[in-house]
């Protein structure tokens, strides 16, 4: 009985829910990045799924191409998406949150920690304990 | 003449179709009145016929050129794939054609009236033809000026000059003995004076028509 | 291989009795939208008419789609859709007549798209042009330009006089044009919100001169308002790239067009807040600064 009284215009498309507000204090490219990240995080945009082309998304959102391009570039440097030249952009593998770049970053951090630990005179076990403590603190937040 | 030019001229015709039809109707009715018999009706009829053609010319020039400029439809025309020279040429050509249509019909009508009506002396024919030729030349002057004028005041001045010129023509050319003395003749006299005046009209027409090509070549701003 | 720029203006000069456009240079690459912003009387319409070949420059060069203007304007205009807010259609005819007229002139006319636009813009083909409201007339002119799918669209105030719904529809259609990376748009507008949203690059013009021309994101990243609280007796730091400084007792507001983290570090601990600026704020600050510097 409700269906006949309410007629809601339902649009089902890959990015119809993305809204860019100009009254929002955050710049448009950040809003785009956030909303894409959100969809990837919950799994609506699964790993390996192709993203709309920059121009297609720009046209759909009525936002300049240069803004979408910037969002895609930043997402790629975060490792959230991967761009294959000439083929398009895809949601990155590995939970969509870690990528090759993230792996690199982790190695860098670990190398720095090892070096600093040695300077402080910590043993490997001490260092491991400190790492576990840091993870516990992270879980608490 | 390329297809865009043709379309724009057709547009002008379409735009002025009522005006053209109205002028032809009034002109033909005036000729009928002129041929009704009495001198009074002849004078009234000829005056109306004359006014119809002259007024039509002025209104046409105003509407097609100044009107288009004022109404900003000019910007739309200029957004089409044509250059400045193309525009001036097509306006000259197109508006002239719009004038020629009723002019030709009413001139022919006047000639037919003179020849066919038994009560009307055919001797009037040379002068009548020169008058028709003058109306055409006079109109082309207005048309040319409308194309170059940038202010409406100037065009208004030109129209006033145009109207005065018609009276001047009648008062100056009419009394010339070669015409005046033969007005009541049964058959027309095609004397040298006739051909001279006709030649002057034709030459003036030619000069006025070529002027745009020289002035246009120097001007580079559409607006 | 770099594709031919769609618009190239180089050191263009055009003098009128009371106004001169001086040393204007701008470029529009294919696949881009340029927003052209300036106060009234700045020379936007003059510049646009120079691009369309309706005016000839006194000095400098204008090339559109590779054609020299105004000499080759007839060729160039085959591929340009021009809409100006003071343009009028033929009053004696209907919108349908105009559609048929334009369709017969341009081979690129897309009848399906035209039909869709009539619906989207809420117009009727049978309606006489003279009976259209000014907003409907603007939409009609836009329709005639869009349905031809021209490579370049030059629009002088395309959304002026349009209600928010119509504006939204028009912007959607303009962005749709950019799906093709060989098509481009230049539009002038007072609506800085729209310009900020859809432009790839933006050009500011004031009193006949170029004030600034850059990528939109570049503008938005370079400009900042910095709020500082400077204790009495402390000298204010001497800042390069300062557009304006407003001092109200201890409260100092700086506006800069070359923001960077280094700048922030340089200013030190007295900085309370750093705010991004909207395009409108950037535009106004730019113009005032330009007038000061140029002594206009």
Image: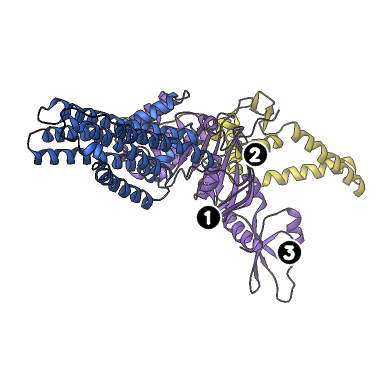
Chain colours: A yellow, B blue, C purple
Q: Secondary structure at mark 1?
A: loop
Image mark 2: chain? A
Of residue A24 and residue C70, the one placed in the foreground of this image is C70
* Label 2 in the same subunit as label 1: no
Residue B205 % position (x, y): 38, 35
Residue B148: x and y in percent read: 43, 44
Q: Position of residue B143 (x, y in %)?
A: 37, 40
- What's the CA distance linking mark 2 and mark 1? 29 Å
Find out whether the residues at labels 2 and 1 contact each other: C-beta distance under 8 Å.
no
Q: Which numbered disc covers residue C269?
A: 3
Identify the residue at image location x=64%, y=24%.
A48
The quadrant where residue B130 appears = top left
Residue C39 image label: 1
* Residue sitting nearer the eye, B184 or A115: B184
Residue A70 marker: 2
Looking at the image, is mark 3 or mark 2 nearer the viewer?
2
The answer to which of B79 and B35 lies nearer the viewer is: B35
First of labels 3, 1 by sequence position = 1
Q: Quadrant of residue A91?
A: top right
Chain to which mark 3 belongs? C
């Amino acid at each position: 009985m409700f269906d006949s009284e309410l007629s809601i215009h339902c649009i089902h498309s890959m990015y119809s829910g993305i809204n860019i507000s100009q009254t929002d204090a955050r710049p448009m490219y950040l809003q785009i990045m956030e909303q894409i990240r959100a969809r990837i995080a919950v799994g609506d945009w699964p790993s390996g799924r192709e993203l709309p082309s920059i121009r297609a998304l720009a046209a759909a959102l009525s936002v300049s191409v240069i803004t979408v391009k910037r969002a895609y570039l930043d997402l790629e440097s975060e490792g959230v998406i991967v761009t294959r030249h000439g083929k398009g952009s895809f949601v990155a593998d590995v939970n969509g949150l870690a990528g090759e770049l993230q792996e690199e970053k982790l190695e860098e951090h670990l190398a720095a920690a090892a070096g600093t630990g040695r300077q402080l005179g910590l043993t490997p076990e001490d260092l491991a304990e400190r790492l576990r403590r840091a993870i516990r603190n992270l879980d608490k937040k | 003449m390329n297809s865009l030019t043709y379309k724009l001229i057709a547009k002008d015709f379409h735009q002025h179709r009522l005006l053209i039809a109205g002028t032809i109707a009034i002109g033909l009715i005036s000729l009928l009145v002129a041929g009704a018999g009495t001198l009074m009706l002849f004078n009234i009829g000829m005056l109306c016929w004359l006014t119809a053609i002259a007024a039509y010319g002025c209104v046409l020039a105003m509407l097609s050129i100044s009107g288009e400029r004022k109404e900003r439809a000019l910007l739309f025309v200029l957004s089409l794939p044509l250059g400045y020279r193309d525009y001036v040429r097509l306006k000259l050509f197109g508006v002239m054609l719009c004038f020629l249509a009723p002019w030709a019909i009413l001139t022919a009508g006047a000639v037919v009236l003179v020849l066919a009506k038994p009560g009307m002396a055919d001797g009037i024919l040379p002068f009548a033809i020169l008058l028709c030729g003058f109306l055409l030349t006079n109109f082309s002057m207005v048309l040319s000026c409308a194309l170059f004028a940038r202010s409406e005041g100037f065009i208004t001045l030109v129209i006033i000059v145009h109207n005065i010129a018609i009276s001047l023509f009648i008062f100056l050319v009419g009394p010339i003995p070669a015409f005046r003395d033969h007005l009541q003749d049964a058959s027309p006299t095609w004397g040298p004076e006739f051909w001279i005046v006709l030649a002057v009209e034709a030459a003036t027409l030619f000069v006025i028509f070529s002027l745009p090509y020289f002035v246009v070549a120097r001007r580079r701003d559409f607006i | 291989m770099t594709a031919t720029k769609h618009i190239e203006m180089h050191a263009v000069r055009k003098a009128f009795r009371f106004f001169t456009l001086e040393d204007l240079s701008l470029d529009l690459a294919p696949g881009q939208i340029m927003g052209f912003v300036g106060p009234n009387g700045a020379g936007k319409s003059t510049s646009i008419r120079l691009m369309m070949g309706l005016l000839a420059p006194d000095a400098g060069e204008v090339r559109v789609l590779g054609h020299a203007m105004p000499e080759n304007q007839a060729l160039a205009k085959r591929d340009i859709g021009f809409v100006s807010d003071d343009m009028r259609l033929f009053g004696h005819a209907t919108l349908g007549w105009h559609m048929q007229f334009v369709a017969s002139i341009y081979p690129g006319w897309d009848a399906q798209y035209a039909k869709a636009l009539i619906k989207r813009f809420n117009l009727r083909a049978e309606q006489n042009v003279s009976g259209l409201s000014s907003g409907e007339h603007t939409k009609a002119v836009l329709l005639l330009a869009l349905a031809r799918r021209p490579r370049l669209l030059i629009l002088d105030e395309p959304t002026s006089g349009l209600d928010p719904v119509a504006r939204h529809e028009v912007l959607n259609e303009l962005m749709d044009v950019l799906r093709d990376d060989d098509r481009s748009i230049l539009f002038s507008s007072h609506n800085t919100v729209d310009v900020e949203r859809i432009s790839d690059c933006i050009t500011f013009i004031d009193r006949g001169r170029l004030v600034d021309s850059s990528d939109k994101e570049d503008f938005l990243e370079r400009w900042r308002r910095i709020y500082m609280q400077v204790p009495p007796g402390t000298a204010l730091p001497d800042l390069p790239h300062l557009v304006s400084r407003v001092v109200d007792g201890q409260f100092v507001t700086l506006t800069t067009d070359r923001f960077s983290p280094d700048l922030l570090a340089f200013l030190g601990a007295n900085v309370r807040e750093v705010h991004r600026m909207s395009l409108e704020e950037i535009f106004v600050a730019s113009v005032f600064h330009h007038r000061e510097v140029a002594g206009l």
